[in-house]
Image (tube, rainbow, N blue to C red):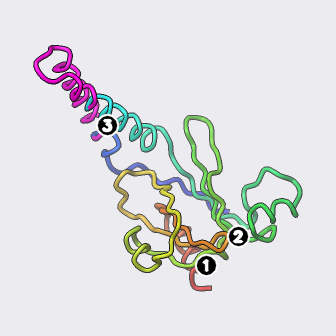
Amino acid sequence: MHRYTPPRINRAGIIIPLFLFGAAAICMFFAVSGLANRLILQLITVICLTAGIQITARYRLCSFTYIIDERPVIRDTDPDAIGAAYGQEFGTPALSVVRTQGKYGRTVAVLPLSGIVDVVNSRAEAEKKHSDIKYHYNYCVNLFPRAQRTVVFVHDDRKAAISLEPDDVILNYLMKSDDN
């Protein structure tokens, strides 16, 4: 089993929300003072506050851990139910993504390595090579990741993609699975 949690490497997750909160405060000041159209300024205030809170909650208050394991992270004890739930045989190597917020962690994705179709450098490249991708999930820790990889896989006869910030060990696992 290999476990990796990407570090936060840029400050965009702090600077952008601070800018949005500052813009909201300025708009609210002018809306209260009556110097401009209140409705528009209040609407801009609500939009800035909402965006700032969403970015803070997503990129500063939570993190993702990637786990490569021969036996997927599971809660059930019946091997037949587990295999059916994940569409794989019990014990098949899998990539698990665990979202941690505060002291609580929750498994948000379990991807059998046998279902990987392609590993590319960006979401745009994945959509260009595979036009039939139905879903895209972003499990990156940073708002603007430097070492992002997009993994295209098949699930229930539909293609989906997930964006990750893997280390070299996990990337090697993904690339090996892509070759098979």
Identify the disc placed on residue 17.
3
Position of residue 100 measured from the top left corner of the image (x, y, whole percent): 57, 43
| Within-10-Å neighbours for mark 2: few <14, some 14–19, many 20+ | many
Going from the N terminus, do you reach mark 2 or mark 1 first? Answer: 2
Magenta residues, start to end: 16-43
- Magenta span: predominant SS is helix
Using the rendered view, name the quadrant where residue 19 is placed: top left
- Dot 2 lies on which element? loop
Q: Nearer the viewer, residue 14 or 160?
A: 160
- Dot 1 lies on which element? helix
| Residues marked 1 and 3 touching at CB (< 8 Å) | no
- Dot 3 lies on which element? helix
Q: Nearer the viewer, residue 177 or 53?
A: 53
- Amino acid type of the residue tagged 3 in the rendering: Pro
Tell me the distance, in whole angstroms, between the alpha carbons under discs 1 and 3.
38 Å
Going from the N terminus, do you reach mark 2 or mark 3 first? Answer: 3
| Residues marked 2 and 1 touching at CB (< 8 Å) | yes
Vertical placement of 100 versus 133: above or below?
Answer: above
Residue closest to the far left? 35
Q: Residue at x 50, y 75 (%)?
A: 132
Q: Nearer the viewer, residue 90 or 167?
A: 90
Vertical placement of 112 versus 74: above or below?
Answer: below
Tell me the distance, in whole angstroms, between the alpha carbons under discs 2 and 3.
38 Å
Query: Can you identify the residue that label 2 sits on?
Result: 93
Q: Nearer the viewer, residue 16 or 131?
A: 131
Q: Residue at x 19, y 25 (%)?
A: 26
Number of numbered labels in the structure image: 3
Query: Can you identify the residue that label 1 sits on?
Result: 177
